[in-house]
């Protein structure tokens, strides 16, 4: 069907599957009736849960037709999304944001640090960058072991990337015991050509401060309400940047004042 | 070629500013708007107390190229005004503070803060179509328009601009606003509308109803500007659906001296304003206008 609408329209998408793969963590597969453009890693979509909410979620995987998202239950919107079964319709707006917007050199080696559900956009990043010959080591930290799922199983193109795990409840025996930042301190970061971190603001703040001279990239979260640079709710403090049109990936130097001034902890 | 213009006594280096509600309620927003190349900043409509606004979806692009929004006048309240004014002044930018309220007292409250903070002008929002009590209920009744403008004019020394929305009595309301002391008029605001998704069979906006903006309202706005100009020749800021220099030029020859751009700034494109200005210059060249003022209202007089 010819569906001539812009990127900021709500486009229909059918739920293919929506399953819980770890405690309160879901993988949602959508088949859009029409896709505006090929999403880039760290692009996000506003997922419209009809008459309930509209939620920003990063693209977790894309196979040319179907979009996958990883999300964690937080409040009413994500709860309602979790109740959407096969063949139900939702709306999608996007792809939004600039995506990664980094040009890594060929055959370089990158370290990605993910905290909790910050893991969401990483499978698609690994898949896309693999095509440029970029090797990613992943350090993934979670609070409790039951938040972990097997990334290689759900995202087979991640096979080949080294995954290092850290649990705060120390129940996962083949990984670090402690926070992702504790684990990071045991890793020789200078070995990498670049670093990208994503997770709670508290974690990003520590990483930006500790690794400031390496100027890592971080993917931020602010309140996204329109996704098109008009409502202003997603602005980055002490900058002229909007997360929804300029982000969500920034270098630490661009957002350090924002992180310093925010004491949000989630 | 001269694109400089003054509106309500404020000197602008060119006629383009942002429309109210496009960013404009945080210091950071001002920086972004300056990047876009506007000649003046218009704030988000500010109410006496902070307003939270509606939950998403609040803003959707329509298949016809317009936008529908129901933001719910989210704003930080009048205490934020001095900071916004100071930020604009730091960059030598004129700033118009848009004010809103549910009664005369509320308008006066916000206007006084803007006045004391040193804003260049006040734009009275008499026309928000989707937030109950704040606007169109006031703006459609010419007597209410008169009373609000008059009461604000009695407490401030800076110029007042009245922003009106579409209504059957918009020409009469425009006349009343001028009579009450408005130095200029902004025409028009969004138009109450509805968007229903045919796949989920449900209205999309959380508030159900919203305000329509963008290209679909441009011919309506041009009509309003033309009629008001014909009747009173006041100073007019044309607003509604400008996305190219052609839309801008059309407003000017219908009677607008200055212009506001909203919807076309979506997506964070840095060259919208620049390319409209470029187009206007070329257009002036074709007609041999040396000063943009020569073109104002030319189609009405002609
Ligand atoms: C660019 C971006 C990408 C994101 N990608 C993912 C992802 O891939 N997977 C995932 O699980 N989560 C992601 N999030 C966070 C996700 O959007 C929120 O968890 C979700 O909106 C919560 O909605 P809720 O109704 O369930 O919870 P609520 O009860 O509404 O809110 C719970 C908390 O979630 C946050 N939140 C709520 N609404 C928004 C909003 N509109 N924008 C930003 N934060 C909000 C706030 O911190 C709030 O306190 C992303 C956020 C952003 C900004
Ligand atoms: C998201 C959004 C929010 C708006 N908020 C306000 C507002 O607070 N006050 C106001 O006077 N107009 C507001 N408007 C109306 C605009 O200022 C403008 O009148 C209208 O959008 C028409 O211009 P455009 O077609 O160029 O967008 C808003 C418009 C949009 C799209
Ligand atoms: S979410 Fe509205 S401007 Fe970014």
Image: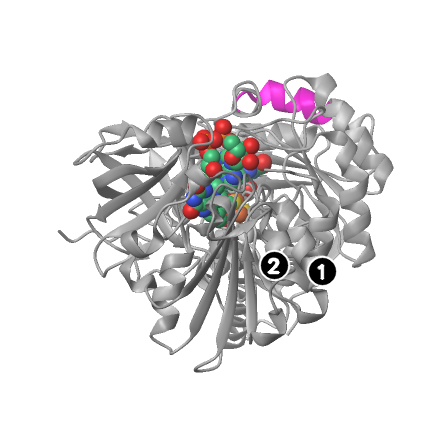
Evaluate if marks 2 and 1 touch, with contact meaning CB atoms under 8 Å apart.
yes
B171 or A112, which lies in front? A112
- Give the magenta-colored segment's residue range: B140-150
Q: Is residue A108 visible?
A: yes
Is residue A65 left or right of A157 when viewed as pictured?
A: left
Locate residue B239, reporting x and y percent.
53, 46
Residue drawn where x is 70% and y is 63% of the image: B13
Locate residue B286, reporting x and y percent.
49, 76
| Foreground: disc 2 or disc 1 | 2
Extreme residue toward the bottom, this view: A106
B4 or A9, which lies in front? A9
A143 or B164, which lies in front? A143
Say which label, 2 or 1, has the lower sequence index.
Answer: 2
Q: What secondary structure is marked by label 1?
A: helix
Q: Which residue is mark 1?
A: A210
Q: Chain of mark 2?
A: A
Locate residue B150, reporting x and y percent.
73, 24
Q: Which mark is residue A223?
A: none
Q: Which residue is mark 2?
A: A184
């Amino acid at each position: 069907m010819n569906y001539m609408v812009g990127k900021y329209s709500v486009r229909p998408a059918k739920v293919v599957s929506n399953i819980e793969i770890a405690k309160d963590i879901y993988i949602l597969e959508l088949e859009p009736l029409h896709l505006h453009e090929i999403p880039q890693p760290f692009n996000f979509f506003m997922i419209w849960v009809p008459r309930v909410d509209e939620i920003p979620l990063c693209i977790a995987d894309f196979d040319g037709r179907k979009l996958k998202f990883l999300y964690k239950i937080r409040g009413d919107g994500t709860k309602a999304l979790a109740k959407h079964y096969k063949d139900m319709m939702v709306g999608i707006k996007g792809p939004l944001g600039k995506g990664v917007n980094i040009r890594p050199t060929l055959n370089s080696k990158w370290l990605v640090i993910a905290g909790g559900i910050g893991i969401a956009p990483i499978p698609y990043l690994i898949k896309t960058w693999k095509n440029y010959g970029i090797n990613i080591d992943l350090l993934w930290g979670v609070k409790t072991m039951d938040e972990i799922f097997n990334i290689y199983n759900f995202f087979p193109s991640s096979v080949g990337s080294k995954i290092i795990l850290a649990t705060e409840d120390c129940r996962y025996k083949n990984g670090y015991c402690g926070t992702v930042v504790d684990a990071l301190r045991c890793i020789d970061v200078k070995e990498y050509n670049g670093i990208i971190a994503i997770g709670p603001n508290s974690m990003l703040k520590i990483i930006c401060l500790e690794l400031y001279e390496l100027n890592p990239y971080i993917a931020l979260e602010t309140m996204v309400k329109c996704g098109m640079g008009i409502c202003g709710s997603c602005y980055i403090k002490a900058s002229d940047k909007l997360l929804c049109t300029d982000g969500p990936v920034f270098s630490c130097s661009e957002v350090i004042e924002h992180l310093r001034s925010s004491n949000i902890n989630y | 070629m001269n694109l400089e213009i003054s509106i309500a006594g404020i000197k602008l280096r060119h006629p383009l500013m942002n429309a109210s509600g496009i960013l404009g309620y945080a210091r950071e927003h001002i920086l972004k708007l300056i990047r876009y190349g506007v000649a003046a900043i218009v704030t988000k409509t500010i109410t006496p107390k902070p307003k939270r606004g509606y939950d998403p979806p609040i803003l959707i692009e329509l298949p016809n190229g317009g936008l529908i929004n129901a933001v719910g006048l989210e704003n930080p309240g009048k205490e934020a005004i001095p900071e916004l004014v100071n930020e604009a002044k730091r960059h030598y930018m004129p700033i118009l503070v848009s004010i809103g309220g549910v009664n005369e007292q509320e308008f006066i409250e916000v206007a006084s803060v803007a006045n004391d903070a040193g804003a260049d002008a006040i734009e009275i929002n008499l026309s928000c179509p989707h937030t109950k009590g704040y606007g169109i209920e006031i703006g459609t009744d010419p007597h209410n328009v008169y009373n609000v403008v008059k009461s604000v004019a009695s407490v401030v020394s800076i110029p007042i601009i009245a922003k009106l929305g579409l209504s059957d009595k918009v020409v009469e309301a425009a006349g009343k606003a001028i009579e009450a002391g408005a130095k200029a008029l902004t025409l028009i605001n969004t138009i109450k509308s509805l968007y229903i998704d045919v796949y989920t069979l449900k209205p999309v906006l959380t508030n159900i109803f919203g305000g329509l903006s963008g290209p679909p309202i441009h011919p309506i706005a041009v009509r309003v500007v033309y009629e008001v100009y014909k009747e009173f020749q006041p100073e007019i800021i044309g607003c509604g659906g400008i996305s190219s220099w052609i839309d801008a030029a059309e407003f000017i020859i219908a009677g607008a001296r200055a212009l506001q751009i909203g919807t076309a700034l979506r997506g964070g494109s840095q060259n919208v304003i620049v390319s409209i200005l470029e187009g206007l210059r070329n257009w002036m060249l074709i007609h041999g206008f040396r000063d943009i003022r020569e073109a104002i209202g030319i189609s009405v007089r002609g």
